[in-house]
Image (cartoon, helix red, strand yellow):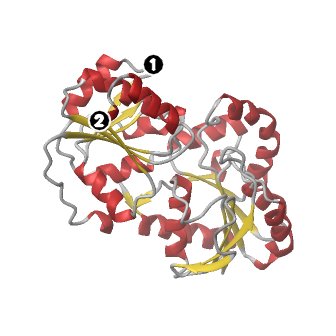
Amino acid sequence: MKILQVCPRYYPFIGGVEEHVRNISERLANRFDLTVFTTDPIRKLPRVEVVNNVKVRRFKSWAPGEAYYFSKELKQYLIRKSNEFDIIHAHNYHAFPALYAAQAKIKNKFIFTPHFHGSGHDPLRSLLHIPYKVFGRNIFTKADKVICVSNYEKSLIMKRFKLDEEKIVVIPNGVDLNEFRGLKKAKKNCKTILCVSRLEKYKGIQYVIEVLPRLESDVVLEIVGKGPYKKNLVKLAKKLNVSDRVKFFKDLPRNELLQKYADADVFVLLSKHEAFGLSVAEALCAGTPCIIANTSALAEWVDGENCFGIDYPIDLDALADLIMKVVGKKVYKPAVLDWDEVANRLAELYEDVCGF
């Protein structure tokens, strides 16, 4: 069976969607003839290469504000080549490659994983969601199956796009559990709060910086990620005189990121919009307790044992109290799928859709 994955960006780009597509592709490539079509907004990566046994073809794109990923080249190539594949599996409602894939569907089966969280990353992008919904609805219409990564995403899509429940399958994101075996927390003379995410306002990292003056001076914040909101976070830390307690990291090798998860005393994600929360799963697998916003799919993680929720609007005193309560708590075995199981479920779905 020939499978095509279509996504806005692929490894070495890092992000929730990118990690999802990379992990399923590397596993499914052992079972199917699999190719990834993606875009290269920086135009510096190889046009065609094999990455960990996955065939990758990149197309030039225009991504204003690191979004949308317009690519006439990808659209035209998909139209020419779509019939060579049994299944086209597109990812990410919030960018145009999925729409191109839907428009290219003729006889092949079309599967869509929207990674949908309900709005744009800022007021302008949220406004653009309104006209885009006319086109975005077409992706769901063309799809033979829609895969959601959480029950929250499923209910949101059913409400927004009036989809029949029978068309939707929930397959959560996974974690490579083998990566976390043997991780040990390093000894240190401070307490570490960790945030791992793209640096956007809606991710809520500004609240973690704002809470630092309310915490003991030996509490530091490590932020892993990059994005347009970094300059605002740097400015805020300086304004609050906590710059010496805030450290930024980007493009960390995977082994170093895993160690960051393990070394942290508490992981915090106060995002307003998440379809799943992959970084929460990774923090838990590294043995680090989490504080998360009671919003979107993040609320599904809250259990009062490993993950603790806080409501919007964020009360800084309540956040400070919760951080000191959670720091250093023992994490009990979290209910997280391994990527191998995710790939198995996808393979079964592919075969079922094609009637194998």
Provide residue 252's location: percent of width, then percent of height.
40, 59
**In this view of the protein, can residue 207 be seen by the observer?**
no
**Quadrant holding the N terminus:** bottom right
Q: Give left or right: position of 220 versus 33.
A: left
Q: Give left or right: position of 252 versus 327.
A: right
Graded by Cα atoms within 10 Å as few (under 14), some (14 to 19) or many (20 or more), the crowding at tag 1 reads: few
Provide residue 243's location: percent of width, then percent of height.
34, 33
Provide residue 148's location: percent of width, then percent of height.
57, 50
Quarter of the rendering containing residue 46: bottom right
Provide residue 197's location: percent of width, then percent of height.
46, 45
Residue drawn at x 81%, y 35% as measured from the top left: 131
Name the residue carrying label 1: 313
**Comes first in the chain, label 1 or label 2:** 2
Quarter of the rendering containing residue 51: bottom right
Amino acid at pointer 2: Arg
Residue drawn at x 26%, y 26% as measured from the top left: 322
Amino acid at pointer 1: Pro
Helix, strand or loop under label 1: loop
> Which of these two is toward me, 122 or 226?
226
> Which of these two is toward me, 113 or 324?
324
Residue drawn at x 64%, y 40% as measured from the top left: 157
> Which of these two is toward me, 39 or 53?
39
Badge number at residue 245? 2
Where is 17 relative to 289, above or below?
A: below
